[in-house]
Amino acid sequence: MVQALRYKRDSWRIWWSKLFVCLDLEKVNESVQACNRLLDLRSKQTDSSKIPELDERCVKGIVGQSLGDLEKAIESGNKAAIDSAERTVKRVEDLLERLRDTMSHPWLFETCAYFNDRRGNGILAHEDLMKQYRSLTGLTGWERDIDKIKKSCKVALIICKMNQKSGSKERFSKSKLMLRTLIKKVESCYDTNNLILPEEFANVKALYDELEESVRVSQTI
């Protein structure tokens, strides 16, 4: 494959093959290199639809492997290994930033949120989850698709739990508004008396009732 790239450096099919070979071999830096090269080729090509977008599986694989390698390096206490792993994670972070400039898929924001959470950056993780939620609920007909309802409810619950932990009154109000809007949107499309909606939706309603109750209690004190 190295020989093939030497003579056909602009062949996206060879870079695509290299990407998945490197993923299988857990070579994160080379996987990132292949991703960046594919992005370069997509940006240069007039009809970029011929070159497939990087998919969820490969991006999440790169993120998970890089963070896992860093954790192992830290556990080993080897400074050289830690420094090397940190540089790799930084390359992955740069790749995610680049992808955010070219994609707006819900799974990408989910991946960025996971990355930032693992890196201890709760503020950025919260922002990414908000973007994921808006991306999911911005899809036409999401409220009529059970799988999309599940995903939207899961993200909304995570965001609201983060808001609760923050202790911010502003975030508390935003949580209530988010859940109320989600509930109304879904219920407007379903006869909830005759159709069993997913457990995630029931959890959203339960959390909303909990927030409402806390408001009532605070008003009586």
Image: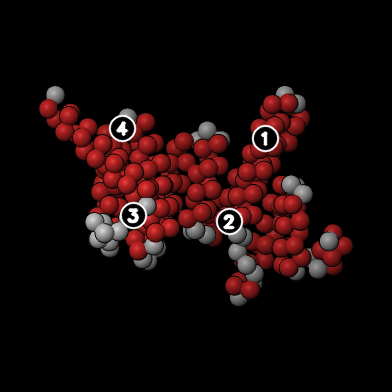
Question: Which one is earlier in the sequence, the residue at label 3 or at label 4?
Answer: 4
Q: Mark 4 points at which residue?
A: 168
Of the residues shown, which amino acid type is indicated by label 3? Leu
Q: Position of residue 73 (x, y in %)?
A: 71, 31
Q: What amino acid type is highlighted by mark number 2?
A: Glu
User: Which type of secondary structure does the marked residue at label 2 adopt?
Assistant: helix
Residue 155 in percent (x, y) is at: 41, 47
Give the distance between the C-alpha atoms of the residues marked 3 and 2, in whole angstroms: 27 Å
Is label 2 in contact with label 1 (beta carbons under 8 Å)? no
Are the two marked residues, 3 and 4, in contact with CB atoms closer than 8 angstroms?
Answer: no
Q: Residues within 10 Å of mark 2 (few under 14, many from 20)?
A: few
Picture coordinates of residue 128 (x, y %)?
Answer: 46, 46
| Marked residue nearer the N-terminal end (4 or 1) | 1
Q: Which amino acid does label 1 sit on?
A: Leu
Mark number displayed over residue 197 = 3
Q: Distance between the residues labelled 4 and 1?
A: 33 Å
Q: Is residue 6 visible?
A: no
Label of residue 56 in the image: 2
Residue at 37% in and 52% down: 198
Q: Can residue 121 be seen in this view?
A: yes
Q: Which of marks 2 and 1 is nearer the N terminus?
A: 2
Task: Residue at 64% x, 61% y: name it.
Answer: 39
Mark 2 vs 4: CB contact within 8 A: no
